[in-house]
Image (tube, rainbow, N blue to C red):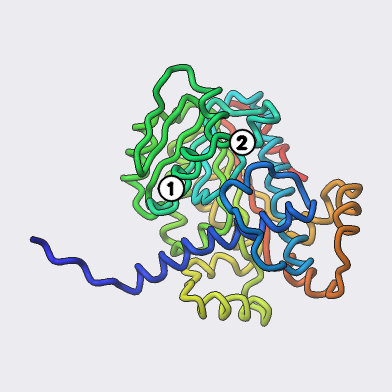
Amino acid sequence: MASKQPFTDSDTADEAVRATCDDASICKRFATSKGYWTDLYVQYFVRQLGERKAPEINRGYYGRVSGMNLLIDAFLKKTQCDCQVVNLGAGLDTTFWRLKDENIMPKKFFEVDFPMIVARKIHHIKTKPPLSKPLIETHSTDSLLLDGHSLDSDRYCIISADLRDLPALEEKLKKFHINPELPTLFLSECVLVYMTPEQSSNLVHWIADTFSTAMFINYEQVNMNDRFGQIMIENLQRRQCNLAGVNVCQSLDSQKERFLSAGWESVNALDMMTVYSMLPQEDVARIERLEFLDEKELLQQLLQHYCICWAVKDKLNLGLSQIGF
């Protein structure tokens, strides 16, 4: 019998990255319980509210979710939903269910993550009718393809894969009928930063080479070479979380360069302080009334150290480069 492989540092690092999936879901669950935005489905993935989150964390997540949703919805509008969405490192994200409720679903919605996270998500979907019912409603035959590490229906698909292994990722996406000719939106939130610059460059290069009409939205750290950025890195390292791709997070320019050097036609990037100021201000005023914020400077520092970067390739001339805030 083959001996078991020893547990390595990279295994520990991967486990720490997987734990960030829980962090994000718990924070989103808490913020929605306070009324920052509506998410009817996160409760089925995260049952407990957990400990109280600071108001600046809740506002930060509000900016993140609102900013991502604004760009996602703009892409769906430009393509008239005749498109695909691929959420890379999706974790327990609920975007598919939101799009179904709002009747703006793409042709197919793909999610990719580590096998362990995918297995957990599939278990939640299988055992909770509010999650499984929308899948069944959008599926034309009796049987869904469902096993421990993948789920495939007509409109929604979850794939277990390591984004650092491009041949395996490509093979699985093909197996579940991704269409490179269809306009395709790629999403990643605090995912590329855990890959080396070479690995993330290879990924965005492969996407640019494979999909002729595409958009990539990346939410991630930025301005990481100042003191506040160093403290963020040290806090994560204490949890064995190594930001292997932090060199790309030095500035908005370095974030944009990752895509420009990989063959994307146009790229924009804004820090979250700017994004927050460009969100619908009536709603921002509403959420700012939810909780008193003592540490306004801390919120500013947090928002200045995250950004949204979006890149497009538009062979079909759909006007994707017009998408923005």
Q: Choose top left, top right, bottom left or bottom right for residue 80.
A: top right
Residue 133 tag number: none
Residue in the picture at 45% in, 28% down = 153
Q: Quadrant of the C terminus?
A: top right
Q: Which residue is mark 2?
A: 97
x, y percentage for residue 257?
Answer: 57, 57
Secondary structure of the residue carrying tag 1 is: helix
x, y percentage for residue 165?
Answer: 34, 52
Q: Amino acid at mark 1?
A: Val
Please state if 119 lies on the left or on the right of 31 as rendered.
Answer: left
Q: Quadrant of the N terminus?
A: bottom left
Residue 118 tag number: 1
Residue in the picture at 32% in, 45% down = 168
Secondary structure of the residue carrying tag 2 is: helix
x, y percentage for residue 88?
Answer: 50, 47
Compared to residue 228, the image places residue 126 above or below, namely above
Q: Amino acid at mark 2?
A: Trp
Number of marks present in the image shown? 2
Residue in the picture at 37% in, 30% down = 145
**For this rendering, which residue is in front, 278 or 213?**
278
**For this rendering, which residue is in front, 212 or 100?**
100
x, y percentage for residue 249?
Answer: 59, 66
Q: Choose top left, top right, bottom left or bottom right for residue 96.
A: top right
